[in-house]
Image (cartoon, rainbow, N blue to C red):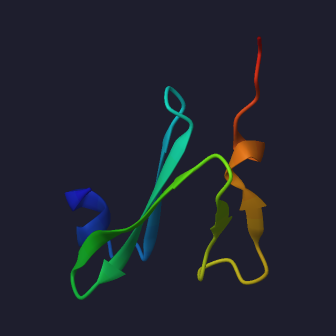
Amino acid sequence: MKLYSRRAVLEYWLVDWSICSVEVYRRHNVHLDLFARLVKGDLLESAMLPGFSTQVDDLFIDFS
């Protein structure tokens, strides 16, 4: 994440398919800090994408 911080990325999502979670990192001063850890049942929204929202559940397809 240091690379993203150096490049002034404002928001970064880390998606973990193995546990169906999304970590949202947002710029605070010069660093990207963990803003939220979302799991199934949570709503993912972004200040960088006005009007965007999706349920975390919708990011993960159940292949069983």
Dividing the picture into quadrants, the one containing residue 30 is bottom left
Quadrant location, the N terminus: bottom left
Dividing the picture into quadrants, the one containing residue 61 is top right
What residue is at 72 percent from the left and 44 percent from the top? 57
What residue is at 64 percent from the left and 46 percent from the top? 40
Specify whether 3 is left or right of 18: left
Farthest residue toward the front? 41
What residue is at 75 percent from the left and 68 percent from the top? 53
Specify whether 38 is left or right of 51: left
Quadrant location, the C terminus: top right
What residue is at 26 percent from the left and 69 percent from the top? 5
Q: Position of residue 47 (x, y in %)?
A: 59, 83
Q: Position of residue 38 (x, y in %)?
A: 53, 55
Residue 40 in the image: above or below residue 13: above
Specify whether 48 is left or right of 61: left
Q: Position of residue 39 (x, y in %)?
A: 56, 49
Total marks shown come to: 0
